[in-house]
Amino acid sequence: MHHLPTVVATDLEWASFYAADLVEARFPGTPRPPRPNLMTAEARELRDQLARVERIERVAVMPGEHPAPVDLDVVTALNNLAIEAYTCAAMVAQAIMCPRPAPPATLQTNVGPLLDFAARHLVEADFVDPGLAEDLAPRARRIVNTLAHHLDLWPDGHVLRITCPWCPKDGPQAVGDGQWTLRVRIMPGDQIAIVCEGSCEPPGKDVTTWWGGRPCWPLWDWAWLAKRLQAA
């Protein structure tokens, strides 16, 4: 059983690193992380057919495009993020009887420092005010999901281009070079985890939990998992 204040603090700490990227993403054309192209030949042919149709039917402003100088969906997300981040920081500050951080100067201000403040002091704040982490957990999860969605950080099914160190290398279920079995998945309750969709069975000390009979590592274990993958 994971310590809830630590889990929520991890969410807030992660979000603090990416908050500035969302500010930049309000400008159309901001680069997003590339997604591995694992399309089948049939899927590529369908994609090309749709692209040819779009080229023929294109007008000045296509559905879903924004003629505005900023991406209005991202601006809306920034507005919501500013409110959520300030609320988290203010509630933590109140619990530890610390002066409240200043609210964002504008709704497009980088709220990373507010999220960082809340992350660093949440465990202490929950000790002083039991139940605070439980109150902030859904808010922190919304923040993480907002950033992940608008920055394309972990779309469901995203492939990690690295070989799982626990998948068998020999035998009928062997995983060869270039076969990537680790995927990012959105679990029940909007929890995000890395799941191995191969045929591995890591030892108990190396896996946090299982989902659908497959080993998975939730967000708060990603730092450990990254070190383990690098060492393999």
Image: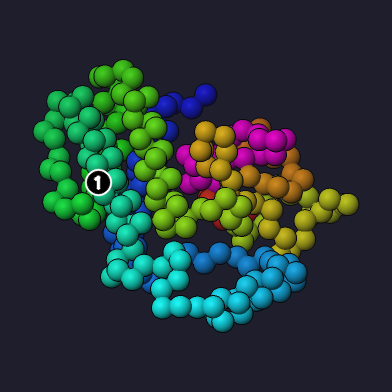
Query: In the figure, 81 relative to 26: above or below?
Result: above
Name the spot of residue 124 as percent of width and height, x first. 27, 26
The answer to whether one can see residue 32 in this image is: no
Q: Position of residue 205 (x, y in %)?
A: 62, 34
* Colour theme: rainbow
At x 62%, y 73%, the residue is 50
Residue 66 placement: quadrant: bottom left
* Residue 21 image position (x, y, % from top left): 33, 59
Q: Is residue 148 left or right of residue 196?
A: left
Over which residues does the magenta segment extend? 208-225
Residue type pointed to by label 1: Ala
Q: Residue at x 35, y 41 (%)?
A: 12
Q: At which x and y percent is residue 2?
A: 48, 27
Q: Which one is nearer the viewer's eye here, 207 or 156?
A: 156
Q: Is residue 1 left or right of residue 203?
A: left
Q: Which residue is mark 1?
A: 82
Mark 1 element type: helix
